[in-house]
Image: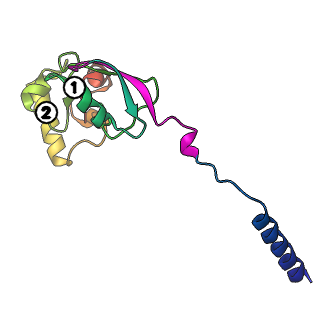
Amino acid sequence: MIKKLILIVFIALTIILQAVDIERIDLSKTVDASYDIEIKGEVEKPGVYTVDRSMTIAKILEKARLKDDADISSLNLSQCMYPHQVLVIPSEKDAPKKISINSATLEELDTLHGIGPSTAQKIIDHRLENNGFKTLEELMEVSGIGEKTFQKIRDHICL
């Protein structure tokens, strides 16, 4: 009985849907295909650009042409931008350089506040013995680096 009822409802809905003229909606027409964004900073052609909504930052920067000292290391070049967004390209000179505790030389580590040549060598030895640092906090496992020293250098280091 229930199967017959379900079958009758299904047939009725099918007939009704075929009789009704359903118009498909093209959603691409509801969103602008292009929009304006602003690029400034270390580019040869700063200004407002009209870009396609699927255009990546890499493609946009091709239009604006990067200057030689542009620092794009913090950008996701495969990302798309949004309408009215501003992209400021910093200079390598402006970007504070962090020292990688996983690849820095003894001399580079020695420039950190509170880290001398012997502690710098201990950092290098520790990373070699442990296949590198997984977190910044692991640096406190190195003899001679406590919480105080770590807090002083934390903003100047990276993995």
Give the crowd class for mark 2: few <14, some 14-19, many >=20 residues within 10 Å.
some
Task: Say if 128 sits above or below 77 in the image.
Answer: below
Name the residue beneath numbered marker 1.
71
**Rendered position, 7 above or below 62:** below
Q: Quadrant of the C terminus?
A: top left
Point out the tag, 1 or 2, that comes first from the N-terminus: 1
Q: Position of residue 31 (x, y in %)?
A: 54, 37
Residue 35 inside the magenta-drawn segment: yes
Where is residue 29? Give x, y as percent. 55, 41
Callout 1 amino acid: Asp
Q: Secondary structure at mark 2?
A: loop
Residue situated in front as seen by the camera: 120 or 31: 31
Residue 110 visible within the image: yes
Residue 73 is at least partly visible in this image: no
Residue at left offset 14%, top offset 27%: 109
User: In this rendering, would 14 be left or right of 110?
Assistant: right
Residue 149, position as x, y percentages in the image: 26, 22
